[in-house]
Image (cartoon, grey):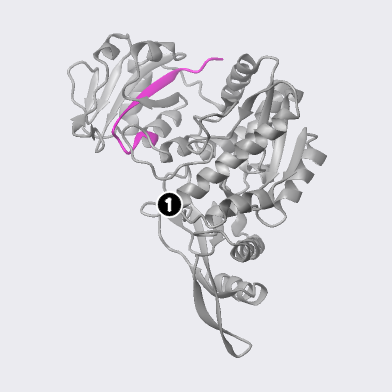
Amino acid sequence: MKQDMIVILDMGSTENTVVARQIRALGVYSEIHPHDITPDALKALDNVKGIILNGGENRVVDGVAVEVDPAIYDCGFPVMSIDHPTAKCEQQLSELPDDATMKAFVFDTCKAEANWNMKNFVADQIELVRRQVGDKKVLLALSGGVDSSVVAALLLKAIGQQLVCVHVNHGLMRKNESEDVVEVFKNQLNANLIYVDATDRFLGKLEGVADPEEKRKIIGGEFIRVFEEEARKLEGIDFLGQGTIYPDIIESGTKTAKMVKSHHNVGGLPEDMQFALVEPLLQLFKDEVRACGIELGLPPHMVYRQPFPGPGLGVRCLGAITRDRLEAVRESDAILRDEFAKAGLDKKVWQYFTVVPDFKAVGVRNHERSMGYMVVIRAVNTIDAMTATIERVDYDILEKIADRIAAEVPSVTRVCFELTKKPVATIEFE
């Protein structure tokens, strides 16, 4: 069943996602598109029922206020403007609408139906994937994280054995994670899984590279090269499946918003990539991805697994990656996850992890002065990864974690707990 859609045109607002989620909460699908979408492109979208022009603080770009194509007003769709006065709109608001105002616009003015739900979304995406892929094969990077797991499940429903999953161990995985991926997906879910150990290859490429954006692009680019090599061993691979979700797109920059960070599956892809992309989760927020996973029948422990960035521990080993600091990140992270699980915090906290900066601090080991690394613990809660708050972890739990890390990771002399919300901080450190 095709879902009715309200289109949000980004006129420089920093709250496009707030409006999109407000509409979806009413049971109506919404998508965010750039302000300069053409009338033909707008009409080509399925089941558009109305348009919202969402203006804001970033409306002026290079000294010029962004405007929509005047022909947009003649496409036959009701238009609401926010912070963007124009006489051509059915409704003009100076601030974000409350729920009653939005409900009246969506249902009374636009005549949309509340048919946005995961069952319909999955059915639509299965149809779209089958139409896009045909009888070809899709190569999927299966990290074992929530996004790639949900994509794998959806693609398996859509194209079955035409899906080839590749798990690349880039040496930046959490402790025992690659082993877990093989066990769950190959042995339990019977996926067509290829395992590639590329640890030395990735760490060699990253040696001496300290800039976070450069690290992300190296990791993303090398991923594609590995996939291309694996694809050449197979026949009929024309597509690359990816778990790109909407926050990835937002944080990688839009025409009216600055980049927060590039994502390996958005801004780090090489220009000469030989695959067409299949990205069925592109318009979903993180909580919607989890709901999609449940709809697809994935086990809850997989769906509610905490997020893990594509570059893995590469963006948690701050600065230029070294094997000893990487090991300190991996071991301290394993201790943190173990203690959070024992305390029941693994079911409460959205994301928690450790990072190790590229410097040493003095400490005392065996009654002697010792220079060691600092481990920083971060624990945050969020719904859609666009904002985040800090989990108030009991001090006794933190002290136990710190004691274990200091005792079990010899290269560490200090353990800290980080307290900054998003914004101003991002969830990850790089």
Quadrant (top left, top right, bottom left, bottom right) of the N terminus: top right
Q: Residues within 10 Å of mark 1 (few under 14, many from 20)?
A: some
Q: What residue would you read off at disc 1?
A: 426
Q: Secondary structure at mark 1?
A: loop
From the viewer's perspective, tell me whether residue 147 is left or right of residue 29. Answer: right
Q: Left or right of 55: which side holds 245?
A: right
Please provide percent x and percent y for residue 87. 17, 17
341 horizontally vs 233: left or right: left
x%, y% of residue 267?
47, 37
Residue 170, position as x, y percentages in the image? 66, 48
| Residue 370 in view, yes or no | yes
- At x 53%, y 53%, the residue is 315
Q: Give the magenta-colored segment's residue range.
A: 1-17
Q: Is residue 159 magenta?
A: no
State the image coordinates of residue 187 (x, y, percent, origin top left).
Answer: 82, 40
Q: For the residue marked with disc 1, what is the amino acid?
A: Thr
Q: Residue at x 57, y 45 (%)?
A: 219
